[in-house]
Amino acid sequence: MASKSQSGFRVLVAGGGIAGLTLANCLERAGVEYILLEAHDNVAPRVGASIGLLPNGSRILDQLGCYDKILEETQGVRITRCLDQDGNVFHISDGVRLLETRFNYAISYLERETVLRVLYENLQDKSPIQLSRRIMNVDHSGTDGVVVHCQDGTIVAGDVLVGCDGVNSLVRREMWRLSEHGKPQATPVSVRHDLKADFQCLFGLSTRTRGVNAGEMDVNFASGFSTMVIGGKDGRVFWFVFAKMDKTYTSPNIPKYSYQDAVEFANEYMDFTIKDGLKFSDLWQSRTSVTLAATEEAELKEWTWGRIACVGDNVHKMTPHMGAGGNAAMESAATLANELRKLGQAAEKTKIDLETVQMHLETYQRGRRDRTSAVCEASAQLARLQALDSVANKIIAFWILPTAGDLLVDVNCDMIIGAAKLDYIPTPERSVQGTMPFNPSLGLGKGESKLKRGFAGLPLLALSLFGPWLAEPSNLAMIDQLTPLFLSYDHASNSVRAWPYTGVLAASSGLDVMRFHLDFGIICAVVLFESSRRANVLTISSLPIAFFYCLQSFKIVHVMGVYCFAHYVQSPIENFRAKDMRLTNRAYSGTVLVTLLVAYYVPLVTAIMPVFSITTRLTWGYIFQYFPFSISILQNGLKHLFLEDVMDEDKIWAPNGDLFLIGLTIFTFALFAFAARLLALIVASSTNLIICLPRKSILTAFVQDFFTEYHGFEPFLEGTRDDGVISDTVRTKLTQSLGLITGDLVDETNVSMPHIFGDSTTWTSVLFKDAILNLVARLSSRVFLGEELCRNEDWLRIAKSYAVDALTATYLMRMTPSLLRPIAYWLILQCRRSRQAVQSARKLIDPEVKKRKMLVDDALQSGAKPNLCERPEFVQKLRDEVIEVLGDEGWAKTSFYKLKLMDSVFKESQPFTPLVSTAMNRLV
């Protein structure tokens, strides 16, 4: 006769393992009546098994009041070493210590029986625990409950049956059997046998062994197998040897092993070197217990049916590499207990029906499915990674893992952060004091979709694509209409127009360019900080040199749009779930201020500010172009020479240690940007004052910039003549008399066009640049030199090449320190070409100059006025005119008007012998 429930709601728990005793404690704290049926006669048998406690399981134990007792029995892991199959260390990590800092619960290993004993002793009422009760079958024919028949004849009835009886669960088998008759969608046979095994594991316990230290974990990665050794409290050693089997076995054909099988398996690895000074044979000799078993893997789709639910390994079995199995079982027990408590409370008011029970049991399964699925997958991947079962896993293990920081720790944290807990028991204070609070919305299986973030970030890509289009002249008016606010502050719409093209800014004043680059310097600082942020490992943000190089090669709007898009997609909120994940490496972030000052700000300001000479500005402008590389070289140099990498300490003890450096750097560069804007306002308001400043000489600057004292640069000297002949010729004689030369230009154009472009009437390929240079050289030479020289090929070659060579030479000379210029002048190729061009030009021009001077002299000679006083033949004519006029008129005033010849001679002779002006001195 089945016993009746005393409270109106009873839960039957099959199995007294980790899941069963955890559920028993949960139900007791919830006030739910239960009976636990354990097949063995001992609740904590010594079978030699160990268990790893992770923060997700430890928090539940803490809620139940068991954790402090367990802490007395164990030692937290503090360091992990990864070794190859020869025992050589290739990666050392204190990630387990970091995990403890994040959740405030250490990873620890201890005997499974110890945890079972603590859980059992924690029960206030131990009478519901019934030992030696092996279940034989389950009766679910009625609608009022479920009846369990035990091997000893005991019959127990309850409202819900929970199977916590392990991987070979009888309750699960009975659930499948009953579902064939009571449920149209019965679980398929193929799914029932979805239990598989790829690996076998020899696990054991040893006493104190030389080479094994408490709190240390050593993991060997080898081809086809792996090992794990953990030093526990009081010299206890927990060890595992995992080996891949010859094939994948499925239930019910998964092999079982005897002790003799374990001995034979161990003999294969006796000479295996775990690490320097420790071989597997050392552990074997000090063993106290050992077991060989296949490591089953399964994730079943059906956890419940009717009034039956399964918890733990019987529905989510995973490899022991992550130590996640026992902790997952505790989570499932806690999740189910939350639902059973609700059923118990409902049963106090009314009798609960089958549909209500099924609804709560299905809620339990939905709440756990995603997390357990992700944990099973992660555990399986880790097993295969450590066994190096593929080329990809070998690359990950030996190349990526050593450089990926705390990758495995982050995987474990993903498994832990979304852990379930008991909703009806207060959260332990210890669990909220870590740097990575538990959050059920995060973790494995809960990550934000990168595809969704990609769609959300498409506007950033749109800026890259359409930003240059917005800068087209036809669209600037639209920008002004769409951004009226910009027009009211500092003419910011100009910045909007110029943003897609740094070249547009170059056409503005130097202060505008400097203001823009100082603003952009803050972005450069942010990019450098992001490159050293822990959350950005293996993302595009970790490659600042690529970002800076692209800035020099492409339009800034393209680069910023793509960078921000990639950074957004690769930086979901879960990347910053831990406080230390936003931490930057102080060895790098501490150099950002100095690095940008030296490699970015100093070259920029020196190249732009007009207070420096043109040579200095050009030199520093050239240096500035290489800032992507100089930043990288300088930052790494400072880091390795002067700063110590304290990331391993900061991530555990000082996750906020970099905030002062970041704040100081950004504040400093923000002050620079503010100063640039203030300077621009001051200069803009002081334009008239600057114009009135004395001693402004463009000619002096011209002489310095174009090195007119050196041979080969004489043409530039003509521009500094005091008589202004060049400017007068161009502005007055030429510009105002264009009509006089138009005919010559037309004539030369008609002659040059066929010569340059040919006479063909069909399409012909022409180098347009060379053609234009030829045409300009011919026309300008026709105006200044005449028809003969403008068609002289030697002269045209000089006219085209000198401008390029001379300007290039002056540029190179400006970049050369003043003390070295006399030497550089003779070494620079363009200087030599300029000298040769001037010599050749003089040979061609001198004959034309002499010819023009002769024309001037001839013109003067042919049209010169003679000095008549030196002509004797005029003397007699003058005497005759004087005698004749004075003889008739006398010395009258009117007589002088009739002396026509004398008047003409005086006028013609006076320029040669002018009268000397005299003046009376005056004393004031």
Image: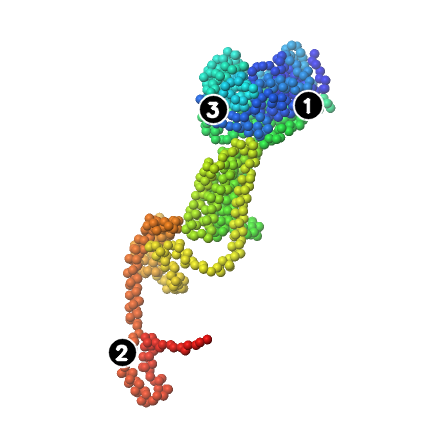
Extreme residue in the left direction: 873
Q: Which residue is mark 1?
A: 30
Q: Secondary structure at mark 3?
A: strand
Task: Please tell me which residue is depicted at 46% across the width and 22% down the height of the picture.
Answer: 276
Question: Which callout, 3 or 1, points at the residue further toward the start of the chain?
Answer: 1
- Give coordinates of residue 802: x percent, y percent: 34, 53
Mark 2 or mark 3, which is nearer to you?
3
Q: Are marks 3 and 1 in contact (CB under 8 Å)?
A: no
Question: Which callout, 2 or 3, points at the residue further toward the start of the chain?
Answer: 3
- Give coordinates of residue 659: x percent, y percent: 56, 38
Q: Is residue 178 above or below residue 92?
A: above
Task: Please tell me which residue is depicted at 38% across the width and 61% down the height of the picture.
Answer: 721
Quadrant of image for the N terminus: top right
Q: Secondary structure at mark 1?
A: helix
Q: Quadrant of residue 140?
A: top right
Label 3 and label 1: CA atoms lie apart by 46 Å
Q: Amino acid at mark 1?
A: Ala
Q: Secondary structure at mark 2?
A: loop
Q: Is residue 289 above or below residue 88?
A: above
Q: Residues within 10 Å of mark 1 (few under 14, many from 20)?
A: some
Label 2 and label 3: CA atoms lie apart by 123 Å
In this rendered view, identify the residue nearer to me: 232 or 10.
Answer: 232
